[in-house]
Amino acid sequence: MPRRPWEVRRSPRHGRGVYATARIPAGTRIIEYTGELIPEVEGERRYPTPPDGSEEPEHTYLLTLDAERVIDANVGGNAARFINHSCEPNCEPIAYGDRMWIVAIRDIRVGEELAYDYAIELDERHTPARKRRFPCRCGARRCRGSILKPKGQLFHPLVRAAIRRWGPGRASG
Ligand SMILES: C[S@@+](CC[C@H](N)C(=O)[O-])C[C@H]1O[C@@H](n2cnc3c(N)ncnc32)[C@H](O)[C@@H]1O
Ligand SMILES: [Zn+2]
Protein backbone atom coordinates (compact mmCIF):
# COMPACT_ATOMS: atom_id res chain seq x y z
CA MET A 1 0.00 0.00 0.00
CA PRO A 2 1.38 3.46 -0.86
CA ARG A 3 2.25 5.78 2.01
CA ARG A 4 -0.80 7.87 1.17
CA PRO A 5 -3.59 5.64 -0.11
CA TRP A 6 -5.97 8.56 -0.52
CA GLU A 7 -6.52 11.85 -2.36
CA VAL A 8 -8.76 14.90 -1.89
CA ARG A 9 -11.27 15.74 -4.62
CA ARG A 10 -14.78 17.11 -5.01
CA SER A 11 -17.56 15.03 -3.51
CA PRO A 12 -21.24 14.79 -4.50
CA ARG A 13 -21.98 14.67 -0.76
CA HIS A 14 -20.50 18.09 -0.05
CA GLY A 15 -17.53 20.25 -1.13
CA ARG A 16 -14.36 18.26 -1.01
CA GLY A 17 -14.03 14.65 0.14
CA VAL A 18 -11.25 12.10 0.57
CA TYR A 19 -11.06 9.05 -1.72
CA ALA A 20 -9.12 5.79 -1.57
CA THR A 21 -6.48 5.52 -4.32
CA ALA A 22 -5.43 2.00 -3.25
CA ARG A 23 -7.13 -0.87 -1.46
CA ILE A 24 -7.08 -0.12 2.28
CA PRO A 25 -7.34 -3.17 4.56
CA ALA A 26 -9.56 -3.11 7.66
CA GLY A 27 -7.67 -1.83 10.70
CA THR A 28 -5.37 0.51 8.77
CA ARG A 29 -4.64 3.86 10.43
CA ILE A 30 -5.32 5.88 7.29
CA ILE A 31 -4.59 9.44 8.36
CA GLU A 32 -4.23 11.33 11.62
CA TYR A 33 -6.88 14.00 12.27
CA THR A 34 -4.58 16.90 13.10
CA GLY A 35 -5.45 20.27 14.60
CA GLU A 36 -5.35 22.24 17.81
CA LEU A 37 -6.40 20.28 20.90
CA ILE A 38 -8.77 22.48 22.91
CA PRO A 39 -11.34 22.09 25.70
CA GLU A 40 -14.85 21.34 24.47
CA VAL A 41 -16.14 24.62 25.96
CA GLU A 42 -13.53 26.53 23.95
CA GLY A 43 -14.80 24.80 20.78
CA GLU A 44 -18.33 25.91 21.63
CA ARG A 45 -17.04 29.46 22.23
CA ARG A 46 -15.18 29.54 18.89
CA TYR A 47 -18.04 28.04 16.87
CA PRO A 48 -21.32 28.67 18.70
CA THR A 49 -24.30 26.72 17.45
CA PRO A 50 -26.43 29.15 15.41
CA PRO A 51 -29.82 29.90 16.94
CA ASP A 52 -32.91 27.99 15.89
CA GLY A 53 -34.42 29.34 12.70
CA SER A 54 -31.00 29.96 11.15
CA GLU A 55 -30.94 28.84 7.51
CA GLU A 56 -27.21 28.20 7.34
CA PRO A 57 -26.27 24.53 7.56
CA GLU A 58 -23.70 23.60 10.19
CA HIS A 59 -20.12 23.39 8.95
CA THR A 60 -17.18 23.07 11.31
CA TYR A 61 -13.88 21.24 11.47
CA LEU A 62 -14.15 19.98 15.04
CA LEU A 63 -13.67 16.37 16.11
CA THR A 64 -14.40 15.13 19.62
CA LEU A 65 -11.39 13.45 21.25
CA ASP A 66 -13.03 12.61 24.58
CA ALA A 67 -15.61 13.96 27.03
CA GLU A 68 -13.64 17.17 27.66
CA ARG A 69 -11.59 17.86 24.54
CA VAL A 70 -12.04 18.48 20.83
CA ILE A 71 -9.59 18.88 17.94
CA ASP A 72 -10.00 22.12 15.96
CA ALA A 73 -8.80 21.38 12.41
CA ASN A 74 -9.17 25.04 11.43
CA VAL A 75 -5.82 25.40 13.20
CA GLY A 76 -3.14 23.07 11.82
CA GLY A 77 -5.64 20.73 10.17
CA ASN A 78 -4.68 18.32 7.37
CA ALA A 79 -6.67 16.49 4.67
CA ALA A 80 -8.54 14.46 7.30
CA ARG A 81 -10.76 17.49 7.86
CA PHE A 82 -12.26 16.90 4.41
CA ILE A 83 -13.57 13.43 5.26
CA ASN A 84 -17.34 13.56 4.94
CA HIS A 85 -20.03 11.79 6.95
CA SER A 86 -21.81 8.57 6.02
CA CYS A 87 -24.65 6.76 7.77
CA GLU A 88 -22.96 3.51 6.57
CA PRO A 89 -19.34 4.42 7.28
CA ASN A 90 -16.14 2.69 6.19
CA CYS A 91 -13.90 4.30 8.81
CA GLU A 92 -13.99 5.59 12.36
CA PRO A 93 -11.92 8.07 14.40
CA ILE A 94 -9.99 6.20 17.11
CA ALA A 95 -8.04 7.87 19.92
CA TYR A 96 -4.41 6.89 20.52
CA GLY A 97 -3.49 8.89 23.60
CA ASP A 98 -4.07 12.55 22.77
CA ARG A 99 -4.16 11.90 19.03
CA MET A 100 -6.96 10.82 16.79
CA TRP A 101 -6.55 8.56 13.74
CA ILE A 102 -9.07 7.72 11.07
CA VAL A 103 -9.09 3.90 10.97
CA ALA A 104 -10.59 1.65 8.26
CA ILE A 105 -13.40 -0.43 9.81
CA ARG A 106 -13.59 -2.74 6.78
CA ASP A 107 -11.61 -3.28 3.60
CA ILE A 108 -12.00 -0.17 1.43
CA ARG A 109 -11.90 -0.44 -2.38
CA VAL A 110 -10.05 1.91 -4.74
CA GLY A 111 -12.26 4.89 -5.58
CA GLU A 112 -14.48 4.66 -2.48
CA GLU A 113 -15.01 7.87 -0.59
CA LEU A 114 -13.75 7.65 2.99
CA ALA A 115 -16.45 8.50 5.49
CA TYR A 116 -17.21 8.11 9.16
CA ASP A 117 -20.43 8.66 11.11
CA TYR A 118 -20.27 12.20 12.51
CA ALA A 119 -22.92 11.04 15.01
CA ILE A 120 -23.77 14.56 16.13
CA GLU A 121 -26.09 14.65 19.14
CA LEU A 122 -27.42 18.04 20.15
CA ASP A 123 -28.31 18.81 23.76
CA GLU A 124 -31.70 19.97 22.50
CA ARG A 125 -34.39 17.74 21.00
CA HIS A 126 -33.73 16.68 17.38
CA THR A 127 -36.78 18.35 15.87
CA PRO A 128 -37.45 18.06 12.10
CA ALA A 129 -36.28 21.68 11.70
CA ARG A 130 -32.99 20.96 13.48
CA LYS A 131 -32.46 17.78 11.42
CA ARG A 132 -32.88 19.83 8.25
CA ARG A 133 -30.01 22.08 9.38
CA PHE A 134 -27.78 18.98 9.21
CA PRO A 135 -28.87 17.35 5.92
CA CYS A 136 -27.15 14.12 4.83
CA ARG A 137 -26.41 13.23 1.23
CA CYS A 138 -24.40 10.07 1.87
CA GLY A 139 -26.60 8.02 -0.48
CA ALA A 140 -26.50 4.93 1.76
CA ARG A 141 -29.46 2.57 1.53
CA ARG A 142 -30.23 3.31 5.18
CA CYS A 143 -29.35 7.02 5.12
CA ARG A 144 -30.87 8.77 8.16
CA GLY A 145 -31.43 11.91 6.08
CA SER A 146 -29.50 13.90 8.65
CA ILE A 147 -25.99 13.94 10.08
CA LEU A 148 -27.63 14.10 13.52
CA LYS A 149 -27.62 10.72 15.26
CA PRO A 150 -30.94 9.89 16.89
CA LYS A 151 -30.41 10.02 20.65
CA GLY A 152 -29.66 6.61 22.09
CA GLN A 153 -29.35 4.94 18.68
CA LEU A 154 -26.46 2.49 18.53
CA PHE A 155 -23.55 3.04 16.16
CA HIS A 156 -23.33 0.90 13.01
CA PRO A 157 -22.21 -2.68 13.95
CA LEU A 158 -18.87 -2.20 12.12
CA VAL A 159 -18.19 0.94 14.18
CA ARG A 160 -18.96 -0.88 17.44
CA ALA A 161 -16.72 -3.78 16.43
CA ALA A 162 -13.90 -1.35 15.55
CA ILE A 163 -14.17 0.44 18.89
CA ARG A 164 -14.06 -2.89 20.74
CA ARG A 165 -11.00 -3.96 18.74
CA TRP A 166 -9.01 -0.76 18.38
CA GLY A 167 -10.71 1.67 20.81
CA PRO A 168 -11.11 3.90 22.64
CA GLY A 169 -13.42 5.53 20.18
CA ARG A 170 -16.27 7.88 20.83
CA ALA A 171 -17.93 6.90 24.04
CA SER A 172 -21.65 6.49 23.52
CA GLY A 173 -23.58 4.01 21.39
C1 LIG B 1 -15.55 18.63 8.19
S1 LIG B 1 -16.48 19.19 6.82
C2 LIG B 1 -16.18 17.93 5.65
C3 LIG B 1 -15.46 18.45 4.43
C4 LIG B 1 -16.32 19.29 3.52
N1 LIG B 1 -16.89 18.46 2.46
C5 LIG B 1 -15.51 20.42 2.93
O1 LIG B 1 -15.36 20.49 1.70
O2 LIG B 1 -15.01 21.26 3.68
C6 LIG B 1 -18.06 18.89 7.49
C7 LIG B 1 -19.20 19.44 6.70
O3 LIG B 1 -19.32 18.80 5.43
C8 LIG B 1 -20.69 18.64 5.12
N2 LIG B 1 -20.97 17.20 4.97
C9 LIG B 1 -20.19 16.17 5.39
N3 LIG B 1 -20.75 14.99 5.11
C10 LIG B 1 -21.92 15.26 4.50
C11 LIG B 1 -22.98 14.43 3.98
N4 LIG B 1 -22.94 13.11 4.03
N5 LIG B 1 -24.04 15.06 3.43
C12 LIG B 1 -24.11 16.41 3.37
N6 LIG B 1 -23.14 17.25 3.84
C13 LIG B 1 -22.07 16.68 4.41
C14 LIG B 1 -21.50 19.26 6.25
O4 LIG B 1 -21.76 20.59 5.93
C15 LIG B 1 -20.52 19.19 7.39
O5 LIG B 1 -20.76 20.12 8.39
ZN1 LIG C 1 -26.72 9.55 5.30
Image (cartoon, rainbow, N blue to C red):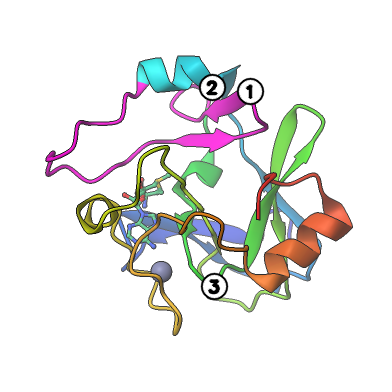
Label 2 secondary element = helix
x and y percent of residue 12 in the render? 31, 68
Label 3 secondary element = loop
Q: How many marks?
A: 3
Q: Which of the labelled discs sits on residue 147, or is there none?
A: none
Q: CA distance from mark 1 to mark 3?
A: 27 Å
Asked if the residue at tag 3 contacts the one at tag 1, i.e. Cβ–Cβ closer than 8 Å, the answer is: no
**Taking 149 as reference, is 22 above or below it?**
below
Q: Which of the labelled discs sits on residue 88, or is there none?
A: 3
Look at the image and say whether residue 24 sits in the magenta stretch.
no
Residue pictured at 54% horizontal, 72% vertical: 88
**Taking 151 as reference, is 41 above or below it?**
above
Residue with the mark numbered 2 = 40
Task: Choose top left, top right, bottom left or bottom right for residue 28.
Answer: bottom right
Q: Nearer the viewer, residue 110 or 108?
A: 108
**Range drawn in magenta:** 47-76
Residue with the mark numbered 1 = 68
Residue pictured at 73% horizontal, 73% vertical: 106
Mark 1 Cα shell of 10 Å, populated few (<14), some (14-19), many (≥20)? few
Label 1 secondary element = loop
Look at the image and say whether residue 52 sits in the magenta stretch.
yes
**Taking 56 as reference, is 160 above or below it?**
below
Q: CA distance from mark 1 to mark 2?
A: 5 Å
Q: Nearer the viewer, mark 1 or mark 3?
A: 1
Asked if the residue at tag 3 contacts the one at tag 2, i.e. Cβ–Cβ closer than 8 Å, the answer is: no
* Dot 1 amino acid type: Glu
* Dot 2 amino acid type: Glu
Q: Nearer the viewer, residue 76 or 92?
A: 92
